[in-house]
Amino acid sequence: MTIHPLHSTTHTEPNAQARIHLAAALRMAVLHELDEGIDNHFTVEVPGRSGQYLILPFGLHWSEARASDLMVFDESGRTLEGHGVVELSAQCIHAPLHRITGARVVLHTHQTWSLALNMLKDNRLLPATQTAAFFHGQIAYDDTYTGLAATVQEGERLAAVMGNKTILFMKNHGVVTVGRTIGEAYRRLYKLERACRTQVLAMSTGQPLNILSEEVIDRVLTPGADDRHPRGERERLFFEAMMRVVDRDLPGYAE
């Protein structure tokens, strides 16, 4: 199978790759119904430039995201490259999360099924499916919604809650996933939505859930010696496949 060099996750120019992958992820989120129009935020640290972040300018719909449209901002909210002004909550949530957790990629959405679970008093994702088992021990829970994020201090509070986890559940608000690459963070977001959907649907039956044992969870999380596709390769293959879908259904993100 041949991958166009512009779409490859091994594209040789890091800044161009980051722009293409971020624009692609935004369009993927529309196809997967994870978006909220022009709201919510995906950010990636500009390769080689600590404290500077790529984001889609506020006002553009995620379905029209292009690599050339992305702007660069810093934690003070200054626009360093491109056109537009960073949305306040994006500045206040994302910049501190990048700075404090060290995450290269931060994705924040109000996606339906994850938010439905976060509306409950007991919003814990339970290891009752194989997909949910992969998230075992990786989720931090912020159980106090404080209103719109309007200060950097709120982002710092969220970063402290998140710690070294890869996912943050924000009660009454939404979710955050982080990653070393856009593909890694997006795959977490995509699979998280499906794990939350199956749990909410199962809970709606009123029947007790069958929770996996710690022994089984450990087996799920421990790759076998004969695993033909290590985790990093699975993430790469997943993201490249999704980019091909976007090429077909919402082309133009690499422009």
Image (cartoon, rainbow, N blue to C red):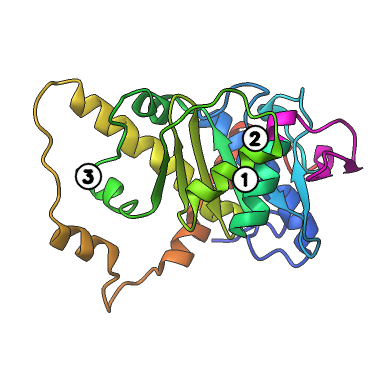
Number of callouts in the render?
3
**Apparent side of residue 181 relative to residue 208 in the rendered image (left or right):** right
Q: Report which quarter residue 112 is drawn in.
A: top left
Considering the numbered disc 3 on the image, is that residue within a helix, a strand or a loop? Answer: loop
Amino acid under disc 1: Glu
> Circles 3 and 1: CB distance less than 8 Å?
no
Crowdedness near tag 1: few (<14), some (14–19) or many (≥20) residues, C-alpha within 10 Å:
many
Q: CA distance from mark 3 to mark 2?
A: 28 Å
**Apparent side of residue 107 relative to residue 135 in the rendered image (left or right):** right
Crowdedness near tag 3: few (<14), some (14–19) or many (≥20) residues, C-alpha within 10 Å:
some
Residue corresponding to mark 2: 41
Residue corresponding to mark 1: 156
> Circles 1 and 2: CB distance less than 8 Å?
no
Asked if one can make out residue 234 in the rendered structure from this viewpoint, the answer is yes
Which residue shows up at 55% across the image and 40% down it?
Answer: 245
The residue stretch that appears in magenta: 68-90
Task: Locate residue 186, reporting x and y percent.
Answer: 53, 46
Q: Is residue 118 above or below residue 222?
A: above
Relative to the observer, which residue lies in front, 235 or 228? 235
